[in-house]
Amino acid sequence: EILKHNINVELFFNDLRHAKSRVLMLDYDGILAPFQVNRMEAFPYPEVENILEKLIDQKKTRVIIITGRQIRDLLSLFKLASKVEVWGSHGLEKLSINGRYEILPVDQFLIEGLAKAEKWVLTTLEWPPFTCEKCPEQGAGAKALREAMKSVGVEVEFVFLPWTRAIKEGV
């Protein structure tokens, strides 16, 4: 029903205002902070942290920041990381407000299924030194993944896309 085009937006926001509990999940890169060629320069847009801090201080909304980054990378960029939940590495890492850090286990069925593949073809962006088409071995991250997958008999190929195309296509 949510996907229908005839949603009563006023009713939705009224219900939201009166809800006993709320969750706001926000992606970091591209939503809270602009994409940057040097990913460690992707600081939040002006006023993002002030607006979120006001929301957090009301204590009515659970705020979760979601990122493909490792949580430790986000901590140096986003000063509110200690006041919100952070789900990093595409959900494999979780950092709670009380500081509890956990790495979630990867389902064995998924691991076995992926390992049965003879070749993985992955799309990526230029993120030197992790992935870089012109770097030795296409970057440290690409090298590490290739070596790990080679140990289980899987070949890994990287297809590099320009930023504008990757962003446009949602890669």
Image: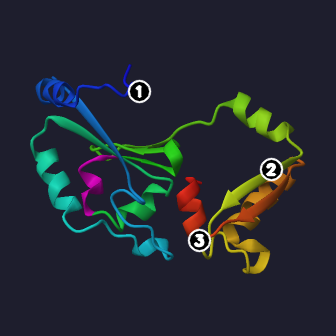
The residue singled out by tag 1 in the image is 3
Label 3: which secondary element: loop
Q: Earlier in the sequence, mark 3 or mark 2?
A: 2
Quadrant in which residue 148 is drawn = bottom right
Give coordinates of residue 153: x percent, y percent.
90, 48
The residue singled out by tag 2 in the image is 120
Kind of residue indicated by mark 1: Leu
Which residue is more in the foreground, 6 or 35?
6
Label 1: which secondary element: loop
Image quadrant in which the N terminus is located: top left
Q: Check residue 127 in the rendering and tell me which mark sits there, or answer none.
A: 3
**Real-space CA distance between mark 3 and mark 1, rounded to the nearest whole angstrom:** 35 Å
In the rendered picture of this protein, how many numbered marks are placed on residues?
3
Which residue is more in the foreground, 37 or 53?
37
Label 2: which secondary element: strand
Q: Is residue 81 magenta?
A: yes
Q: Check residue 42 in the rendering and tell me which mark sits there, or answer none.
A: none
Q: Which residues are magenta?
A: 79-85
Quadrant in which residue 96 is drawn = top left
